[in-house]
Image (cartoon, rainbow, N blue to C red):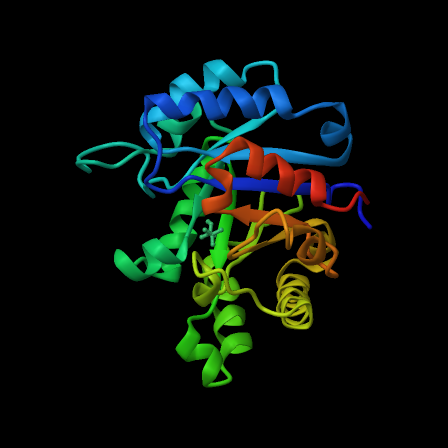
Amino acid sequence: MPASRRVLIAGNWKMNGLKSSLTEIEALAAGYDGDLKAKLDLLVCPPATLLISAAERLAGSGVQLGGQNCHPAPAGAHTGGISAEMLKDAGVTSVIVGHSERRTNLSESDAVVMAKVKAAWCFGLLPIVCVGETAEERDAGEAVGVVTRQVHQSLPEGCTASNLVIAYEPVWAIGTGRTPTPEDVANIHGTIRSVLRSQFGVEADGIRILYGGSVKPDNAATLMAVADVDGALVGGASLKAADFLAIARATPAR
Ligand SMILES: O=C[C@H](O)COP(=O)(O)O
């Protein structure tokens, strides 16, 4: 196992969280104890409105702060947009790009996702690139093909173990309580690893591949033990620090 593939447990709050939710950020900072620090990286991605306040509360805790999206352009006339530089300025070190909710609801293409990866790199942010098939695609036997295409077409040249994380999130598992079998997860993660190897050579062996979709405290141990699963991207169960920390604690040590 390459040293760079340290487990990453990431929380995506999506469009949830008010100022009162900063108590959960404080609880995360307090709960990321020595045992967890020895075992894994912990990252939380609250909504943009909370980033600066969250950064203040996480300072010195070791818990990392992430954004949920960035604009591909560095600055300019993009009403409502948030640039990678703005995220950096707010104290962010990582950014989720290509989440299926944006690919579907906002028609984000693989090309746009690639542009966002490049934008993140311009300001030293670590992009977490999401891929995953819909239920219809899975039922049609297209899961491997869809994920392979997304990985191929969403990633620029120059991906390395230190500048890229992939998150495999089957769309049908997000927020549904349904998860793929460990065999299915191993199959897709193994496919992603192969695609990364074909694109980036030996560097691919150090790139972390997270699983996302209905990860909970009671299934984390099983899912996180699957081959080529290097952590989780957690939605609903990341909103409460107690649940999110329970997932981190349940994750097997490497
Ligand atoms: O980004 C997170 C994923 O969409 C997973 O969400 P979930 O854990 O609520 O299923």
The residue under the point 73% across, 41% down is 6
- Percent position of residue 184, x then y: 63, 72
- Percent position of residue 115, x then y: 39, 49
In the displayed structure image, the side of residue 220 where residue 174 appears, left or right:
left
The residue under the point 39% across, 61% down is 110
In the displayed structure image, the side of residue 164 where residue 1 appears, left or right:
right
The residue under the point 80% across, 47% down is 2
For this orientation, the residue located farthest to the bottom is 140
How many marks overall? 0
The residue under the point 22% across, 32% down is 76
Q: Is residue 254 visible?
A: yes
Check the picture and name the quadrant holding the C terminus: top right
Q: Is residue 193 above or below residue 63?
A: below
In the displayed structure image, the side of residue 84 where residue 61 appears, left or right:
right
In the displayed structure image, the side of residue 162 where residue 64 appears, left or right:
left
- Percent position of residue 245, x then y: 61, 35
